[in-house]
Each structure stands twice: as structure tokens, then as C-alpha cells.
Image (cartoon, rainbow, N blue to C red):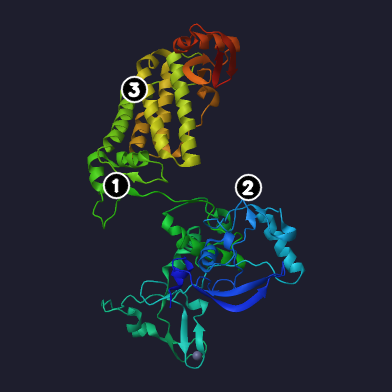
Amino acid sequence: GQDRRARQAGQVEKEGVFTGRHATNPFSGERIPIWVGNFVLMGYGTGAIMAVPAHDQRDFEFARKYGLPVRVVIQPDGQALDGATMPAAYEGPGKLVNSGPFDGLDSEEAIRRMTSHAETHGVGKGTVTYRLKDWLISRQRYWGTPIPVVYCEKDGVVGVPEKDLPVALPPDAPFTGEGGNPLEKVAAFVQARCPRCGGPARRETDTMDTFVDSSWYFYRYVSPHKSDGPFDEAAVRYWFPIDLYVGGIEHAILHLIYSRFWTKVMRDLGLVPFAEPVTRLFPQGMVHKGGEVMSKSRGNTVAPDDVVKEYGADTLRLYILSVAPPELHMEWSTENIAGSHRLVQRVWRFVDRHAGALAKEPRGPLPAELTEPARALHRKVHQTILKVTEEIEERFHLNNAVAAFHELTNEMGRLELDVIQGPGRAVWRETLETLVLLMSPFTPHVAEEMWQRLGHTESLVAQPWPVADAEAAREDAVELAVQVNGKVRGRIMVPREAAEAEIRRLALEEPKVREHLDGKQVLKAVVVPGRLVSLVVR
Ligand SMILES: [Zn+2]
């Protein structure tokens, strides 16, 4: 009478009774006692198991309760487990012990070798056990895809012929709120003709579980106008499998399991040439407010419309993307939206101040010789392209991309006056246009507006993504830590191509480092290029 789910989850107290009988271990010839236990489930595998108390927690708890021997057969590296004293089962990998000819094997390899031994000696065979159960897809409700069968007194269950598909739901079903399936009350729907004998038949009123539809609807997306089949196989071959699925983790155990299962059936039927519908799953975090998940039932939701009214849709979007990496939950803060708004305004003002003049000037390549401020800004622009592109493509850490926008605009503020004079203006144009393009996925509306102000007549949607010039992005100088007897005492900036002797000289002259050298003798000075200088003194 115990709940099967609870037993499966190991949530019930383990109980058992000795049958008085023994079985022979086919590997060792030993006699082993046969017990009946409540935690061994008939529906899983054969319903009979060989208990391994030292290496399965449930078997372990059972063995301890009834004083059964716990024999270690897998020893983890660097440990010596003792079956009499171990406090819990060891379920990790290791080397086999107490296992006769299999002693010393890695446990993974031992599984293969023992399986093959059992097969060779005719005492067993390898098998895969699934915990998937049958899926009951019928539902007693209106909203769902009708199950296309009718019941004929003469012919029994008869499928609706393909030419009569789909079976459409009747638009006039009564929704009374009294329970039961409204379809049963629509006589014109229920009363049907048997496709085989033409006699009267009763139409099935159960509809399919909505998980049936969500298991494969995406295949239809690639050929929505196909009228003589569910999807175009060539289009499916071209577009699938899906590269990336972004969705709440709650989908991983229902919808995604069903759709994977469904796709495998389609693969077996030869409808698709792959076994998995999705290559990568990315579960996003939730929005929190006041330390709790934002939800209607908690009453702590923020209406996006109100934020849009005050700050605009671009700011709202930029704010949401800037708070946290998407896999983590984000804590909503209405005050912090102002920070995102300031970034949008700042970029807008940069464009506004210079767009008029820049739009009138002819476009051309950057001058070969740049002033130092222009070169610094040019470098920052290309570093920003690298950073933003990488954060979007590799990790989806859009918050870091937004941080890079802040950094670039800070640099623009610092260098603006120096750069816009003379030949540096071309760099200023490059900076503004690149920033607008990089921000366009984050703030699409205002980015489009700024793009046009910069003298473009074509939408920025048609523009290619900016490409970084890796050479331009390289720093001229690198920062090195200076260690004295293993402790970092200072940092120096050195030219990228500096010789070792020059680096040593700069390290020894660094004021904080000098304090630690006072009155001491430098025995050794090791330069690790790009990282540090290590001084050994006495
Ligand atoms: Zn019939």
C-alpha cells in the first residue's frame, strides 16, 4: 500500500524479510541470501536485484538495518574503505577488490569485462534499463487535438482516413463549468459515419495531451505553408537540429523529454535523419524582486508598460540585459534603471554633438598616422568589438557586453576633445558608428535613430556586425606584477616589445618595490613575459 513514487524516490523506511532461501553467485559460486525488500520495484528491470551494499546507498541502508555483510568491492584512489565501519555507500569509481580475477580493474572497465564474462558463460547478458513509462496521451477536455478515430458497432475502432483529416473541433461546444468534456455534448461532433462500412459510428471525444503538440510543432515552423503533409523533409534537414533552446529549467523534465522521445520515434520512422531535436539547452534564470521570485501570485510584479512610459523600451531592454548573466536570477531594482537610462542618453549626446558635422564630411580610410589620443580610442573601439562579440557568441553574458559599452563611453568622454580635432575625426566617426551598431541588439529603436543621424539612409539592420582588427586592439603596454620573495609588492607598465633588461630596470625602480629592496641584495630577477617579474632578495 505504500506509494510507488515515494518508494522509488527512496523516501520510505526500508523494510524486508528473509525468504529462507539462497541463490548462487554465478561469478564466485558463493551462497547469497534472498530477501524481499520494499525498495526494490517490480516495474524497474526484472524486479530482482543483486544488492551491492558497499556501493549503493539504498542497499547500504537495508544491509545496515538487517545486519547483512557490507563487502567493499571498489576502492577509490588513495583510500581504504572498510565495510564494517564505512558510514555510507561509496558510489564513485575506483579499482576492484575482493573480485577474484577482476581485481585491480578500473570499475568502468570491470563492468564491461564482467558483462562479457557473463555472456560467454551463458549466465547473463548486458541490457539497458529505462525508467520511462507509457505515456497516456488522452485528455477529457475540449482544448486539444482530437484523436482521429471512430467506434463502429460492426468494425470496432476505425481510424479517420487521411483525406478527412484534420478532425476539427466544433465551434459551438457548451462550456458550462460543470465538469466533463464539452465535446460529448455536441451531437453533430459525436455522431459520425464509419469510414469502412458507412454505418453509424461514435466519434472519439478525448483530445490529445498538449505535450503531443509541443513535442513536434517546431518541425512545422520551417514549412508553414505545406498543405499535403506535416512538414517539408528537405527544410527540416536544412534547419534542424535546433542550435539553441532557451527556456526555463522546468521544461527539461517534461516538454523536452517528450520532444526528444518524439523525435527518436520520427527518426525510427525515417522522417528525420537525427535523434535529438535540440543541440544545446540554455536554462535562463528568474526575475526576483525583494528577494522573491517575481510572480503574479506573489503580487510583486512590475508592469513593463510603466517603465516604458517613463524611460522608453530601449532603456528597459538594456537594463534587463545588464543586471546579471542570463543563467542566474536577476534582482529587479527600479532605481537602477536610471543607470541604464544615463548610458542611452550619454551615447545619444555623443551622436547629437557631432552627427551634423560628420554627416557633411566625406568618408575615407583612417589616416596612417594617428595622434596618441586617436590611437588610444581606436584601440578601445576594437577591444570593445572583440569583447562584445565574444560575450554574445560564447557565453551569452550580455551584462558584460553592457559593461563594455560603459567602458567605451568613459574612454570617449576622456578623449573626445583631443580626438575630434584634425585627422582624429575619422576615428571619432568610427567610434560612434561602431558603438551604435554594437548597441543595436540592446537598444534597437534609438540605435536606428542615431544611425540615420550619422548620415545613413539605409537601416542598420542591413549592416554587417562590426569586425575587430586584432592588431588595432592590441595594447602597446602590458602590466606586470613585481614580486619580492614571492609576494606581489608593486605593478609596472612596460612597452609590449620591451627587452628583459629594460623590464628588470623598471621593476627595480618601482617605488613600492624599492621599499622592500632597501638595504638588501638582489640575488635573482626572473621575467615571466606578459605576467610578472620575480625578485629574490636577501
Ligand atoms: Zn463500420
Q: Nearer the viewer, residue 92 or 116?
A: 92
Sequence-wise first label, 3 or 2: 2
Say few, some or many: other residues with alpha carbon within 10 Å of mark 2 (under 14 / 14 to 19 / 20 or more): few
Element type at mark 1:
loop
- At 45% from the left and 42% from the top, the residue drawn is 396
Q: In this view of the protein, can residue 458 be seen by the observer?
A: no
Kindly identify which residue carries mark 3: 354
Q: In this view, does 366 lie above or below 277?
A: above
Q: Residue 246: x percent and y percent?
A: 45, 51
Name the kind of residue labelled 2 in the image: Asp
- At 46% from the left and 84% from the top, the residue drawn is 150
> Do the residues bearing badges 1 and 3 touch, measured as CB atoms within 8 Å?
no
- At 60% from the left and 13% from the top, the residue drawn is 524
Q: Quadrant of residue 232?
A: bottom right
Q: Residue 147: x percent and y percent?
A: 45, 77
Kindly identify which residue carries mark 2: 77
How many labels sit on residues?
3
Sequence-wise first label, 1 or 3: 1
Q: In which quarter of the image is residue 184?
A: bottom left
Q: Which of 182 and 91 is in front in this view?
A: 91
Q: Residue 381: x percent and y percent?
A: 45, 26
Q: Nearer the viewer, residue 311 or 63?
A: 63
Kindly identify which residue carries mark 1: 291
Does residue 169 appear to the left or right of 474 in the view shown? Answer: left
Element type at mark 3:
helix
Q: Distance between the residues labelled 3 and 2?
A: 67 Å
Name the kind of residue labelled 3 in the image: His
Q: Distance between the residues labelled 2 and 1?
A: 43 Å
Does residue 267 appear to the left or right of 433 in the view shown? Answer: right
